[in-house]
Image: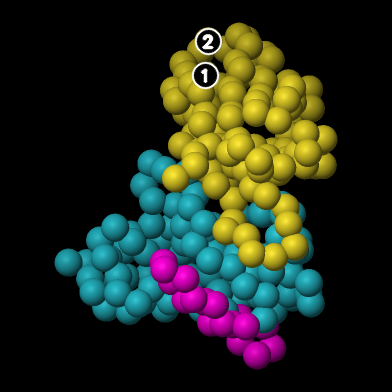
Chain colours: A yellow, B cyan
Amino acid sequence: DARVTQTPRHKVTEMGQEVTMRCQPILGHNTVFWYRQTMMQGLELLAYFRNRAPLDDSGMPKDRFSAEMPDATLATLKIQPSEPRDSAVYFCASGLKRDRGNHGYTFGSGTRLTVV
Amino acid sequence: DAKTTQPNSMESNEEEPVHLPCNHSTISGTDYIHWYRQLPSQGPEYVIHGLTSNVNNRMASLAIAEDRKSSTLILHRATLRDAAVYYCILSWEYGNKLVFGAGTILRVKS
């Protein structure tokens, strides 16, 4: 089965440091999402892209977070500077926007971020 | 985004059918009903989706009320591996964003 690959799987960093999380969407998928999950807030949509163009990043703190798709095989989520409240599991998902016959979005295994 | 309401938790016996309800009284005509589940320590996983008609796939069945204000995810024979959080989500046409709620925690007893 095709997979969404996220790296790193785990990241521990000190407050104030820059953190970059990477996602390799499934080849051919034109829609990519970034979600964050915490016990308190559940799954929150941070941003999503269609054909590499950002469609909605309203869920993302703009002052410290940025999301990009340098090419169709890579999506990145950066936090600079990181804060302890950013500790969470970050999921990437990809899918194919089409008219019919789809199978839903595929999620990666997530990056568990701990900011100390 | 239209809202869904699900029970916080449900319990089932192994090898018995499970019916997971979802209310979505403010659903619009173009909203699709999606179900995802999240197993412990994993990312969400697509289960099934539909618009108006009932749907079946290898994982589950989706029964949609005639007025579309509610739906039910049916697991025909629950196994211990089905223990997960199940999310019912509305989304305007496939390919648009999915906004997750709290979901239903399904516990399966052996």
Q: Are marks 1 and 2 on the same chain?
A: yes
Q: Earlier in the sequence, mark 1 or mark 2?
A: 2
Q: Is residue B57 magenta?
A: yes
Residue B93, position as x, y percentages in the image: 75, 63
Of A64 and A98, the residue lying toward us:
A98
Instruction: Label 2: state its secondary structure.
Output: loop
Cα distance between the residues tagged 1 and 2:
5 Å
Q: Residue at x 57, y 12 (%)?
A: A15
Residue A85 shows in this picture:
no
Q: Which mark is residue A14?
A: 2
Q: Are marks 1 and 2 in contact (CB under 8 Å)?
A: yes
Q: Quadrant of residue A46?
A: top right
The residue at the point 38 percent across, 57 percent down is: B84
Position in image of residue A26 (x %, y %) = 58, 39
> Which residue appears at 53% of the width and 10% of the height?
A14
| Residue stretch rendered in magenta on the structure | B53-70
Please give the count of numbered marks on the rendered protein. 2
